[in-house]
Image: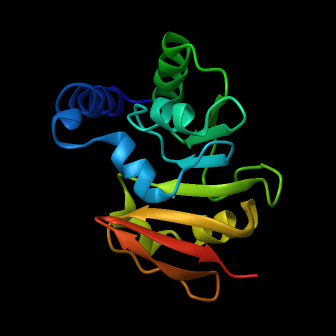
């Protein structure tokens, strides 16, 4: 990983860990996304983990969170946060969201926060999310996004969080 990428990630981490929380409540966003106790949840693009530990706390001990990122620094930072928080129902995975290698129909809900502006170029990711979600699974995206209706149908939105239901 280049020095520029490391510096960029450190800057993003600093903003998320110090300033982002002043303007954003992760629990509010995750509740709008539809997270509930006992669910199996997939977080796409965890970054420095602003939403990860709150997601683990919402789903509780009977639920689980899998969080993905292609940046090894992000996965390392999230693993540190998981350990510091003492949550045991989270697994951070270094992988591409377009080809996760995870079993099909494993998740009740997947959420994409923080980079939904790029969703238009996420065709392969959306196809993979469709594969990973259980029948009637929910995809929640922060921000307006074009999601193919052959894969997901819109359910509505709460604030900036839009929900879609998996189409069979």
Tell whether 135 sits left or right of 48. right
- The image shows residue 6, relative to residue 32, as above or below, that is above
Question: Looking at this view, is 56 or 72 the one in front?
Answer: 56
Q: Quadrant of the C terminus?
A: bottom right
User: Residue at coordinates 64% horizontally, 81% vertically from top-left?
Assistant: 151
Q: Kindly indicate the quadrant of the structure image that contains residue 64.
A: top right
User: Residue at coordinates 30% horizontally, 28% vertically from top-left?
Assistant: 13
Tell whether 161 sits left or right of 38. left
Instruction: Name the spot of residue 36 as percent of width and height, x first.
Output: 58, 48
Colour mapping used in the image: rainbow
Instruction: Name the spot of residue 159 as percent of width and height, x first.
Output: 28, 65
Instruction: Name the spot of residue 111 as percent of width and height, x first.
Output: 51, 55
- The image shows residue 145, relative to residue 83, as above or below, that is below
User: Residue at coordinates 80% horizontally, 60% vertically from top-left?
Assistant: 105
Tell whether 108 sits left or right of 71. right
Q: Quadrant of the N terminus?
A: top left
Q: Residue placed farthest to the right in the image?
A: 103
Instruction: Name the spot of residue 20 as percent of width and height, x first.
Output: 22, 37
Q: Kindly indicate the quadrant of the structure image that contains residue 145.
A: bottom left
Q: Residue placed farthest to the front in the image?
A: 37
Please tell me how many numbered marks the rendered image carries: 0
């Amino acid at each position: 990983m280049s020095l520029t990428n490391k510096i960029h990630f450190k800057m993003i981490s600093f903003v998320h860990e110090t300033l982002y929380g002043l303007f954003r409540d992760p629990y509010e966003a995750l509740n709008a996304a539809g997270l509930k106790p006992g669910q199996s949840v997939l977080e796409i693009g965890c970054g420095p983990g602003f939403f990860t530990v709150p997601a683990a706390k919402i789903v509780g001990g009977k639920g689980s969170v899998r969080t993905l990122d292609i940046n090894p620094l992000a996965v390392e930072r999230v693993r540190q946060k998981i350990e510091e928080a003492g949550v045991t129902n989270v697994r951070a995975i270094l992988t591409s969201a377009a080809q996760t290698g995870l079993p099909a129909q494993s998740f009740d809900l997947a959420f994409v926060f923080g980079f939904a502006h790029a969703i238009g170029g996420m065709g392969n990711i959306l196809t993979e999310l469709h594969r990973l979600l259980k029948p009637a699974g929910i995809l929640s995206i922060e921000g307006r996004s074009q999601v193919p209706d052959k894969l997901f149908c819109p359910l509505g939105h709460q604030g900036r969080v839009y929900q879609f239901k998996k189409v069979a």
